[in-house]
Image (cartoon, grey):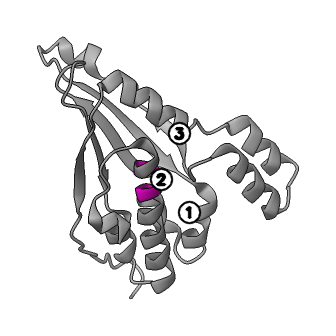
């Protein structure tokens, strides 16, 4: 493609809206226990001392028991939205694994548009109606037109399925298969 010419890449997203059979607060606690926060201090220490990549892989395996860390979260948006009269709860997350992302980044750094994965936990009220939301990772990563990137996207779907199984919520067939 000539320099200075923009390109368009279309793909169809598939968003899952997964019912959860427990309260918003309980599921949020379980999710955040299974997907712990990214420890910037620990990982940045590896960067500072220019550690070999296997040490990064080891630290990720140690810190992410279900292959994912939380890189960012909004916290519950309900207090702000209640000011407008909206009673629902919502917490958004960026959940990922930078050692998995690296396996795509090496082919195209623009994959970071979709890594980490965006997730949300919502509820109409704290008594029920809790839902977990995520898009199918393989569709976004396949849009890069690189078989290696697409394969990691499929793998991410399987890892999300394993996390959902651990959390005891329904696993969409498109993630498991």
Is residue 108 at least partly visible in the picture?
Answer: yes
Horizontal side, residue 93 vs residue 99: left or right: left
Q: Nearer the viewer, residue 133 or 161?
A: 161
Residue 160 horizontal/vertical position (percent): 43, 56
Q: Earlier in the sequence, mark 1 or mark 2?
A: 1
Residue designated by label 2:
116
Q: Nearer the viewer, residue 28 or 22?
A: 22
Q: Nearer the viewer, residue 116 or 125?
A: 125
Horizontal side, residue 85 vs residue 93: left or right: left
The kind of secondary structure element at disc 3 is helix
What is the crowding at mark 1: few (fewer than 14 residues within 10 Å), some, or many (at least 20)?
many
Residue at the image point whose x is 76% and y is 39% from the top: 42
What is the crowding at mark 3: few (fewer than 14 residues within 10 Å), some, or many (at least 20)?
many
**Stretch of the chain drawn in magenta:** 160-164
The kind of secondary structure element at disc 1 is helix
Residue designated by label 1:
101
Image quadrant occupied by the C terminus? bottom left
Q: Nearer the viewer, residue 77 or 8?
A: 77
- Check if mark 1's residue and mark 2's residue have beta carbons within 8 Å: yes
Residue designated by label 3:
34
């Amino acid at each position: 493609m000539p320099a200075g010419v923009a390109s368009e890449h279309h793909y169809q997203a598939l968003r899952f809206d997964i019912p959860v059979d427990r309260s918003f607060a309980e599921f949020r606690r379980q999710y955040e226990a299974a997907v712990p926060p990214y420890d910037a201090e620990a990982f940045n220490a590896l960067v500072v001392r220019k550690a070999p990549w296997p040490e990064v892989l080891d630290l990720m395996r140690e810190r992410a028991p279900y292959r994912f860390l939380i890189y960012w979260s909004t916290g519950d948006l309900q207090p702000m939205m209640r000011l407008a009269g909206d009673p629902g709860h919502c917490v958004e997350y960026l959940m990922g694994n930078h050692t998995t992302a690296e396996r795509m980044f090496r082919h195209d750094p623009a994959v970071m548009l979709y890594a980490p994965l965006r997730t949300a936990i919502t509820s109409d009220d704290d008594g029920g109606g809790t839902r977990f939301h995520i898009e199918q990772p393989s569709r976004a990563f396949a849009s890069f037109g690189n078989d290696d990137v697409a394969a990691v996207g499929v793998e991410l779907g399987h890892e999300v399925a394993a996390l959902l199984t651990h959390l005891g919520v329904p696993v969409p067939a498109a993630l498991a298969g």
